[in-house]
Amino acid sequence: MFEGPGTLYVYFSYGMHWCVNITCGPVGVASAVLLRAGQVVDGLEHARRGRTIPLKDLARGPARLAKSLGLDRTADGTNLLDGNGPLTIVPGHDLGGRIRTGPRTGVSKEADRPWRFWIDGDPTVSPYRRSPRAVQIRNDAVRE
């Protein structure tokens, strides 16, 4: 996660699943965004790999997304901007103000920090699930 912007950081999570981050900070500074969901728009036959998962659930969640894209450790360190890796970022559609933010899913620390972003109304976005271990933020009243 210390490479320049647009580099894939692919790692094995909980000894079971591949997950993918995209670096977004300067070289030498750990800064990345976890890819949590996506919509399969091409290559459906490859993404399904014999599975009968509903289309909206095919790439819902970090592990399913990595699996649908066929990403594993071999993609780690590739750049999304140069067109040479297994994944490339291209200009997208205007989302017309549909980007939303909210608390992070399934984390116990900083659980209420609004570092989760999604496209409002997109059926492929995984649902919010607060961790049962999440620390509650205390809002003590200010005494005058």
Image (cartoon, grey):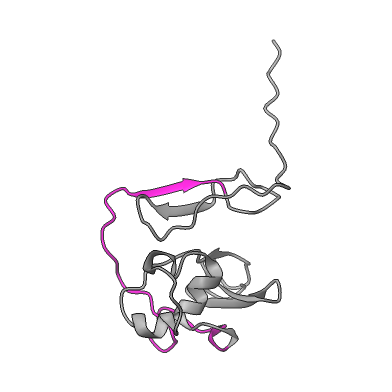
Point out the residue furthest to the front here.
52
Q: Quadrant of residue 85?
A: bottom left
Against 31, residue 67 (above or below) is below
What residue do we see at 58% from left, 78% from top? Answer: 10
What residue do we see at 58% from left, 53% from top? Answer: 105
Residue 26, percent across and down?
55, 69
Against 21, residue 126 (above or below) is above
Q: Nearer the viewer, residue 109 or 133?
A: 133
Q: Main secondary structure of the magenta part?
A: loop
**Magenta stretch holds residue 94:** yes
Against 46, residue 125 (above or below) is above
Q: Quadrant of the N terminus?
A: bottom right
Decide if residue 82 is on the left or right side of residue 20: left
Q: Nearer the viewer, residue 16 or 138?
A: 16
Q: Nearer the viewer, residue 109 or 70?
A: 70
Decide if residue 40 is on the left or right side of residue 139: left
Q: Quadrant of residue 52?
A: bottom left
Q: Nearer the viewer, residue 9 or 55?
A: 55
Q: Quadrant of residue 18?
A: bottom right
What residue do we see at 44% from left, 65% from top? Answer: 57
Residue 69, percent across and down?
45, 79
Q: Quadrant of the C terminus?
A: top right
Residue 19, percent across and down?
58, 73
Which portion, as a residue range, is magenta? 74-103
Residue 80, percent across and down?
43, 79
**Magenta stretch holds residue 21:** no
How many numbered discs sit on the rendered protein? 0
